[in-house]
Image (tube, rainbow, N blue to C red):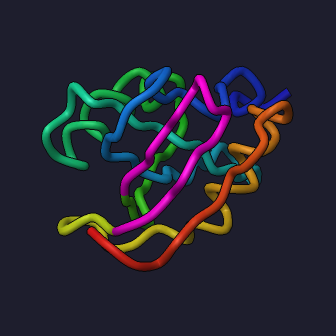
Amino acid sequence: MSGLEGVDDVDIDQSGKFKYILIQLKSGDKKKYIVRGYGRCGYHADIFDEVTPALEKRGITCSCPGGGRIEHNNAAKTILVYGYSMGFGQADHRITVEILKKRFPHYSKISYSNEGY
């Protein structure tokens, strides 16, 4: 078992509009993407700085191919992924949406737009 199986694919705020990043993890020859997004973080880099130290201590290499924003409406069971990160660039929102769909299979709509900031 590589160290990646124990890492949750998604950790985002329960609801609201907030910044998120897509993080690529590597351990040996294994790779996986995870999604992290928190309203408490003012910058995309703050999310990366909060999440990666614990992973790196476990021997996992972390990189951020991009970010954006998430609008999470828990009551309506919808998520919209959009925008980009000034520091990391735009994440591939298609990858993010696929990861979110696995985590929230009961949601009525999980979609993305490459528009907006």
Q: Residue at x 67, y 63 (%)?
A: 95
Residue farthest toward the left in the current orientation of the protein: 42
Q: Where is residue 106 drawn, in percent x and y? A: 84, 31
Q: Residue at x 44, y 25 (%)?
A: 13
Residue sitting nearer the eye, 105 or 92: 105
| Stretch in magenta | 69-83
**For this view, does 99 lie left or right of residue 90?**
right
Q: Which quarter of the picture shows residue 8?
A: top right
Give the answer, above or below, for where 55 lies relative to 86.
above
Give the answer, above or below, for where 85 lies relative to 61.
below
Q: Residue at x 39, y 73 (%)?
A: 90
Q: Which quarter of the picture shows residue 100?
A: top right
Magenta region, main secondary structure? strand
Q: How many marks?
A: 0
Residue farthest toward the front in the current orientation of the protein: 76
Q: Where is residue 14 drawn, in percent x and y? A: 49, 21
Q: Which quarter of the picture shows residue 15?
A: top left
User: Is 77 covered by the magenta stretch?
Assistant: yes
User: Is 15 covered by the magenta stretch?
Assistant: no
Give the answer, above or below, for where 86 lies relative to 18.
below
- Quadrant (top left/top right/bottom left/bottom right) for the C terminus: bottom left
Q: Residue at x 27, y 30 (%)?
A: 39
Q: Where is residue 92 drawn, in percent x and y? A: 55, 71
- Quadrant (top left/top right/bottom left/bottom right) for the N terminus: top right
Residue sitting nearer the eye, 46 or 15: 15
